[in-house]
Amino acid sequence: MSDFQIAIEPEEIVKFLKSEIALKDVYHKILCQKVIHQAAQARGITVTEEEIQTQADRQRREKGLEKASDTLLWLSEQFVTSQDWEVGIYNHLLAQKLAERLFSLEAEKFFHQNSLDFEQVVLYQMLVAYEKLAQEIYYQIEESEISFYHAAYLYDMDDQRRRRCGYEGKVNRGAIQPEIAAIIFSTPPKQLIGPLKTNLGYHLFLVDELIPAELTQQNYQEILHNMFQKWLNVEVDHLLHSS
């Protein structure tokens, strides 16, 4: 295997990426990295050896690489050296620090201005093709002739959700059609909703829990990442056009 790896020349890799119409994506990522390095340098942002080591240790724990030999074996399987790995960690941490410097305040402001979009519900849903069937199911549930969960298992058109008895999990308001979200988020939990017609068919909903909007670390990082990627794409486009 190692002989085969050595036999692959850089030119072959470039030709392969071109043949797979994948070179543009790689080129774009390299340009992104150049923009990040230039912007970080202009702002005096650096990454320390200690920070790289801490991140490396975290990755080793996540991958179950307890021994140094385990880590070296894993790196060799990826065709990279420990130095290559550390460069990747450095680039990742540098991008994180730059994103924080540029958009930490804007991310919090965005959340508060759009907090409704971050409200969640623990939601159950079933979808059927015909209005008459949806109405019959609705009345059967209301009359306690059948539970929502059993009805979803029997009638839901979505096979995967049917096996979950209609369970959708935690769903953000922003992931639901606005007119339907307005009804769902204004209805008390445990109250049957529907039938509501869309181009997919007729929906019945049951809200198990309403979860108020909260700026969690996950929400914060998602907003920060989106803002940073938009900025980065604009900077790369500017770099391409200016050159």
Image: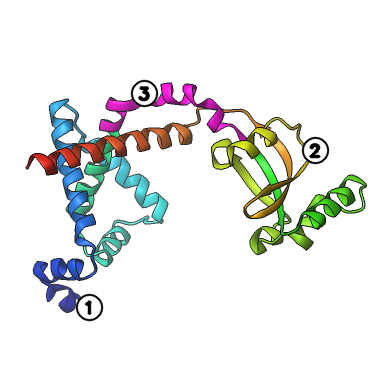
The quadrant where residue 185 appears? top right
Q: Quadrant of the N terminus?
A: bottom left
How far is mark 1 from mark 3, CA to CA? 49 Å
Q: Residue at x 79, y 38 (%)?
A: 190
Report if residue 9 lies within the magenta region: no
Mark 2–mark 1 Cα distance, whole angstroms, equals 61 Å
What residue is disc 1 on? 1
Question: Foreground residue, 159 or 42?
Answer: 159
Q: Which residue is mark 3?
A: 106
Q: How is the image coloured?
A: rainbow
Q: With 165 as the anchor, is 69 left or right in this view?
A: left
- Find out whether residue 110 is within the magenta segment: yes
154 relative to 11 in the view: left or right: right
**Label 3 CA crowd tier, 10 Å (few <14, some 14–19, many 20+):** some
Residue 15 coordinates in the image, percent (x, y) = 14, 70
The C terminus sits in image quarter? top left
Residue at horizontal 13 percent and vertical 27 percent from the top:
42
Q: CA distance from mark 3 to mark 2?
A: 38 Å
Amino acid carrying label 1: it is Met
Q: Residues within 10 Å of mark 1 (few under 14, many from 20)?
A: few
Helix, strand or loop status at disc 3: helix
The residue wearing badge 2 is 191
Badge nearest the viewer, 3 or 2: 2
**Range of the magenta residues?**
98-120
Task: Label 1: state its secondary structure.
Answer: loop
Q: Amino acid at mark 2?
A: Gln
Residue kind at label 3, given as amino acid type: Glu
The secondary element bearing badge 2 is classed as loop
